[in-house]
Amino acid sequence: MFDKKEQKKNILSGYLYILGAIFFTVLMFYLIDDANVEPYNRMLVEKVVVLAIAIACAYTGIKQIRDYKIFLDGIPKPMLDELRTQFELFKSLDISVKEVAHFITKDKEKYFYNNPIIVYSDDVIEALEKLRIKKVNQKEFLIWCNLISFSSCYHFNPKRMDEIGSVINDLKRRMEKNEKITTSQIDAYVKALSENTEI
């Protein structure tokens, strides 16, 4: 969903902070408790600790500035990560149209041009199952079809673009004519998507 390298780097940084905190805590307790440590050695260790804390604070500050300002041209990275999570859930209708539709705007789409969310056949099948059990109505489903078709946030799986496109286009054509999508039609769409064939 997100940049895996970035996520791994953040996790590694977290572990390093924890290890650093444990190490410096143990070291400081040792220095405080051991009266036999020479003043010069004590002062040297204290300077190292202060320097390490300064480096950690500077690193955290730079990371905050990058994530919240420079890195995404004024859009906070955590906000975009959250938005991406919502859009990922939306592609298979795991969250409702009302929760997401108003967030898919031209201003936000530009951040997905180079890294769009890929819509796979399984995502469309999952969405169809939600239409089957009436978790969404046809009006909401039509909005979903239009958003994943025309929004720059989404791209159909390039290897199955024609098959997915044919199903989405047929669904839109029927719903725009106010036709009721029947269970047998949903079965046909699911079969086409499962077998990688066009409608």
Image (cartoon, grey):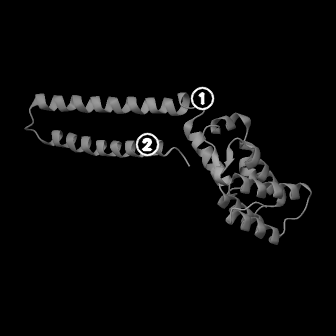
Q: In which quarter of the image is residue 107?
A: top right
Residue 72: x, y in percent? Answer: 57, 32
Near-viewer residue (7 or 125): 125
Left or right? Give the position of 85 relative to 41. Answer: right
Q: Which residue is drawn at 44% across and 30% down?
A: 61
Locate residue 178, reporting x and y percent: 91, 59
Crowdedness near tag 2: few (<14), some (14–19) or many (≥20) residues, C-alpha within 10 Å: few
Mark with earlier residue (2, 1): 2
Secondary structure state at the residue bearing disc 2: helix
Q: Position of residue 102 (x, y in %)?
A: 75, 44
Tag of residue 74: 1
Amino acid type, mark 2: Asn
Q: Residue beneath label 2, please?
A: 10
- The residue positioned 77% from the left and 61% from the top of the image is 136
As shown in the figure, which amino acid type bears the numbered disc 1? Gly
Q: Residue at x 46, y 43 (%)?
A: 5
